[in-house]
Amino acid sequence: MVPNIFESRKSINDVFRDRHTLLPEFIPDELPCRDKEVDQLVANLSILLDPHRSVSVNLALTGQPGVGKTTLAKKTIRDLKNAAISSGINLDTFYVNCHSFRTKTSILRRIALEKFNIQGRGFSDEELMEMLALRLEKEDMRLVLVIDEAAMLSGQDVLAFIHMNELFNPEIGRLSNIVLCRRSDWLLMLSAPLSGRIQDQLNLEGYDEKQLKKILSYRRDLGLYAGVLPDGELDLIIEISSRTRNARHGIEIMLRAGMMANVNGVGGISADLIRAAKTEVYPELRSDVFHDLKSGELLTALAVGRELTKLDGINTTINEAYEEYSNIAIEYNEKVQSMATFRLHITTLENLGIISHIVNTIDEGSRGRRGKISIFDIPAQILVERVLNVLSKRS
């Protein structure tokens, strides 16, 4: 009988009690060290559970990567929906990450399709918004929309969702919004009309070492078997992640180190495995961000990475990267996009924090300006490897 590679590995000591609890999309039952923020959200959103009042609530959650904005928002709307069900209130929620849905149009179409089975193609944004508003009114429904990574949208697009109630039924607030982004991006996006429509803004500060110990201990107990990650080794992860005050960084190191332990069949996580895992985890960049990139954006990122690996370059130019992109597009049997489209891809990658794009004057007296491209948060070779990994899964 031919051995099954999965059956033959069942005897290996798996270090994971529940690997899912260490993944970015996992929403825990408890949120250590965020009691104040939870109380503030509950105070703002409780009015949506009042059957005698129908108002909209618009909030902003800001903070650096890894401080728990997404987890806090997702747990809040999950519990809010369950509370509404218990109270007999027709309330639904919708989460959208603007890494995947980058325009107001795509978000409106997604809501229309998933919540009301409405095919949104062929309708203008205004028509879609009116249809959604009428449907919410017809079904006597309240909808809470979470817009994550909102910096991918313009301030006007965010304002459009907040204005939806006022445009079609100003007396009854059917749509509430929770906007998530980095604080610096929020300040750039904030305009007088938008700031006037936000009832409350919560800025989540990074975690200190004591808070990280609570959070990472909690996730360790959920995700790993007892004894797999001793306190001394956990302290090393805490020390590493305290430099960035980023809990997600520590959780990703824990996950990666556990996977390495499984591959090596050692049954436990050592300090050396933690150090090895640290070299593969970058706190400023979400591990899943590359999976949301479109084909042209992936090829653009690959072109930048390849250019920067040549002669260990500090930066490259738009023209050099575009020439490399053109070769890569041919290599992958893709249509070579125009320079204008390529520049749009560069802007998207910059907004996502994958690359840095600086426009400099070529030299004194020159009429033209040249864009320089670099990477600050991950090595160029790692960028190449991550893009190639995603491309291989799509082929």
Image (cartoon, rainbow, N blue to C red):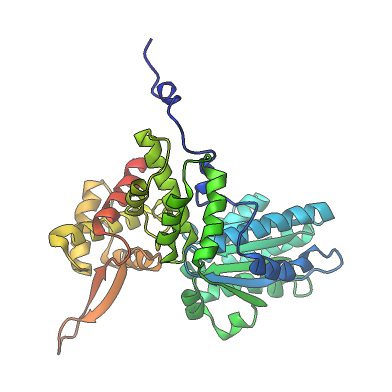
Q: Residue furthest front?
A: 232
The N terminus lies in quadrant: top left
Taking the spot 67% from the left edge, 60% from the top edge, the residue there is: 76
Given residues 28 and 320, the one toward you in this image is 28
Residue 326 in picture, x, y percent from top left: 21, 56
Residue 297 in picture, x, y percent from top left: 34, 58
Taking the spot 70% from the left edge, 75% from the top edge, the residue there is: 166
Please say whether residue 10 is visible from this viewpoint. Answer: yes
Q: Residue furthest right?
A: 52
Query: With 310 as the anchor, is 225 left or right in this view?
Result: right
* On screen, residue 129 above or below 199: above
Taking the spot 43% from the left edge, 57% from the top edge, the residue there is: 286
Which of the 4 quarters of the picture holds residue 191?
Answer: bottom right
Query: With 341 as the anchor, is 331 left or right in this view?
Result: left
Given residues 198 and 260, the one toward you in this image is 260
Taking the spot 50% from the left edge, 75% from the top edge, the residue there is: 183
Residue 215 in picture, x, y percent from top left: 55, 57
Given residues 144 and 238, the one toward you in this image is 238
* On screen, residue 331 above or below 136: above
* On screen, residue 349 above or below 119: below
The C terminus lies in quadrant: top left
Q: Residue furthest left?
A: 311
Figure disc tally = 0
Residue 270 in picture, x, y percent from top left: 38, 45
Please say whether residue 105 is visible from this viewpoint. Answer: no
Query: With 288 as the anchor, is 117 left or right in this view?
Result: right
Q: Residue furthest bottom?
A: 365
